[in-house]
Amino acid sequence: MNDRQQPGWYVFDYGMVISTAPEPEDWEALEEAAGIPLRHPGSSYWLHRLDYDQGKLDSRQYWSRVLGRDVGVGLASEMDSLDAIQWSHLNLDTLDVLELLHSRGSRLAVLSNMPAAMAEDFAGAAWTKYFARLFFSSGIGLTKPEPGVFRHVLDALATAPAAVTFVDDKHENVRAARTLGINAIHHTPGIDLQRELGL
């Protein structure tokens, strides 16, 4: 089978594409453990998140910055567990699309900004069965929308940008991928992903 006949790569973001938004009770559990509010966009949870996703901070360092005090291994592990739980609610419509693509022989990968602790927590999760490759920012050392993230994935997949369809919910990530020649689709949560992909 030559390259033209082989199915292309579909590369999916995780949060808000494969998973749905955290539920209010998830944030409540995380905030109860932290003792401070975290869900609002300007909170310390988000302020230090890219550094955590990129692997610049380990678990204790991240949660110490989030909570504003020194955090031990036990509390850091608890916070990581609660954090993983709140991002573990799967989008059933997306799973249907993954099942369809997988049944057609399409090659699937994940590219997500995700800290190492969460990536480890999700290792072996049921949704990973659809994917031939999993790329997480903490393992790459870069976060989307940095161009180097996409170049890393293209090199690892040994494929041309035009052979990749990338799905993400953030405009800046989609724009960065398109700049490199990747067929990038902006997914709007709640919109039919199958229609967005033209399947």
Image: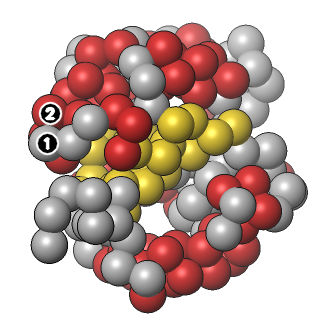
Is residue 135 something one can see in this rendering? yes
* The one of 114 and 186 positioned closer to us in this rendering: 186
Instruction: Give the residue pinned by disc 1.
Output: 158
Q: Amino acid at mark 1?
A: Ala
Residue 53 at what x, y percent from top left? 37, 28
Residue at x-position 48% and y-position 14%: 179
- Gap between marks 2 and 1 measured at Cα: 5 Å
Residue 91 at what x, y percent from top left? 68, 68
Residue 158 at what x, y percent from top left? 13, 42
Secondary structure state at the residue bearing disc 1: loop
Q: Amino acid at mark 2?
A: Asp
Compared to 37, does 97 lie above or below? below
From the viewer's perspective, is 115 left or right of 181?
left
Asked which quadrant contains residue 140, the reply is top left
Asked which quadrant contains residue 7, the reply is bottom left
Compared to 39, does 62 lie above or below? above
Q: Quadrant of the C terminus?
A: bottom right
Compared to 161, does 10 lie above or below? below
Secondary structure state at the residue bearing disc 2: helix
* The one of 197 and 192 positioned closer to us in this rendering: 197
Is residue 139 something one can see in this rendering? no
Q: Which mark is residue 155?
A: 2
Q: Residues within 10 Å of mark 2 (few under 14, many from 20)?
A: few
From the viewer's perspective, is 139 left or right of 68?
left
Residue at x-position 79% and y-position 44%: 188
